[in-house]
Image (cartoon, grey):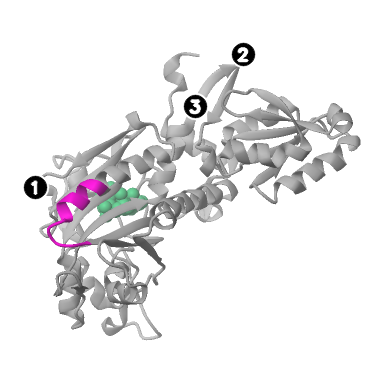
Amino acid sequence: MPEDNMKVTMEKIVSLCKRRGFIFQSSEIYGGLGSCWDYGPLGVELKKNIKDFWWKKVVQERDDMVGLDASIMMHPQVWVASGHVAGFSDPLVECKDCKHRFRSTDIDLSACPDCGGALSEPRMFNLMFKTFMGPVEDASNVVYLRPETAQAQFVNFDNVQSTTRKKLPFGIAQVGKSFRNEITTGNFIFRTREFEQMEIEYFVKPGTDGEWFGYWVNERLNYYVGLGIKKDNLRLRQHDQEELAHYARGCFDVDYNFPIGWSEIEGIANRGDFDLTQHSKFSGKTLDYFDEEKNERYIPYVIEPSSGVDRTLLAVLCDAYDEEMADKELRVVLRINPQIAPVKVAILPLSRNAKLLPMSKGVSALLRQHFMTQYDDAQSIGRRYRRQDEIGTPYCVTIDFQSLDDNQVTIRERDSMQQSRVPVAELVETLKDKFGL
Ligand code: ATP
């Protein structure tokens, strides 16, 4: 097969995700709902593993970070103070002929990209979803679905600092759903209206922010390499002055080389003291920090690394997707970092022969105490290996007739396809070693 045909494309990823149960269109039997997606049995595992990986790296393994899980709906004044009510808008243009709508910054404004029709003047469109709290649907009961998780870290700054007694510098990390009524969605799960974010607000002494900003930019780039993404497919892009929000002192994006081109998976911003100052002003509650060494109070500065779960998952899939010729057949293999693979070990009896059943079920019961496993005895062993390759399962354990005599099983490795025999008594430890557990 020519090399070009074996390249990863968005179509191949979408098709694999649907075929194998990673991601389905939301409400598919009703015709779907614009840009909403459901994570199926494998997708939910991968997504959970990505979030756990992030949490382990940024919370568990550090002593300067604590977690938070705030509510999605917050006091509406939060979004006035943060600037979202007045300014979280995109310029929208509408085609006068086909009525399709676009973000004016995404397209050449000379004519509609869909039908060539004339476009309207841009008008600003607020991206926050609104709803009403309680039974009365009037302006005084409007609440917003949060467009980012981050404001809760600022609003809870005092609660967290006073209960944990953390000294600067320290950070508050949060994972959760965010909602944006995006004008242009698309490219599968790349830009949707409901998505998940993993955000850090890292509070530092004013004057040390430049140094910490550099630290986090570097740290976050390395994080993606640790997640298993190829270094060549990652880059940092610095925002120029025009692109920066008025309060931001600097911003870098971590971009991934998607099949649709280089695009952002994470933004890292130096936000100065803007957020805590705004919330102090609007709430009337002082959100500052008492520096015992200097014996003075001040408002900390903040560095914000903000990552998308769904975009990270898409980058992981695109990066891991591989096709190769093996035994004159096309082998599709997801070379996912074993730590985040949705299924860690597959248990595959050589056949459905009743004699193999008790031992196979025994091995399965043993392994599922330690790993996310899948038991599969349908079709030929070759086909089952291919199925596991396609979903990125790092190890398959095969039970054959010899196993009944010598109490050994075969471990087959996804990437090299190499096989080795291991006594059942050593199986858990051998696999744990392979996973670095
Ligand atoms: P873009 O301009 O590409 O939509 P953004 O610059 O508005 O993104 P941020 O506000 O910096 O994004 O949000 C931080 C991260 O949250 C992004 O890097 C991305 O991973 C994720 N994210 C933001 N908006 C969406 C969305 N609509 N769908 C999926 N993920 C999103």
- How far across and down, in percent of the image, does residue 404 sit? 87, 32
SS class, disc 1:
helix
In magenta stretch: residue 209? yes
| Total marks in image | 3
Residue 101 visible in the current orientation: no
Residue found 61% across the figure and 43% down from its top: 343
Name above or below for residue 103 compared with residue 381.
below
Q: Earlier in the sequence, mark 2 or mark 3?
A: 3
Residue closest to the eye, 312 or 114:
312
Identify the residue under disc 2: 328
Pointer 1 and pointer 2: residues touching (CB < 8 Å)? no
SS class, disc 2:
loop
Stretch in magenta? 204-215
Identify the residue under disc 1: 241
Q: How crowded is mark 1: few (under 14 residues within 10 Å), some or many (20 or more)?
A: few
C-alpha span from label 2 to label 3: 16 Å
Name above or below for residue 150 compared with residue 163.
above
Identify the residue under disc 3: 322
Residue found 31% across the figure and 68% down from its top: 166
SS class, disc 3:
strand
On whether ligand 1 comes within 8 Å of the CB at mark 1, the answer is no
Q: Which of marks 1 and 3 is nearer the N terminus?
A: 1
In the rendered image, which quarter is residue 361 located in? top right
Name above or below for residue 4 compared with residue 238.
above
Q: Earlier in the sequence, mark 1 or mark 2?
A: 1
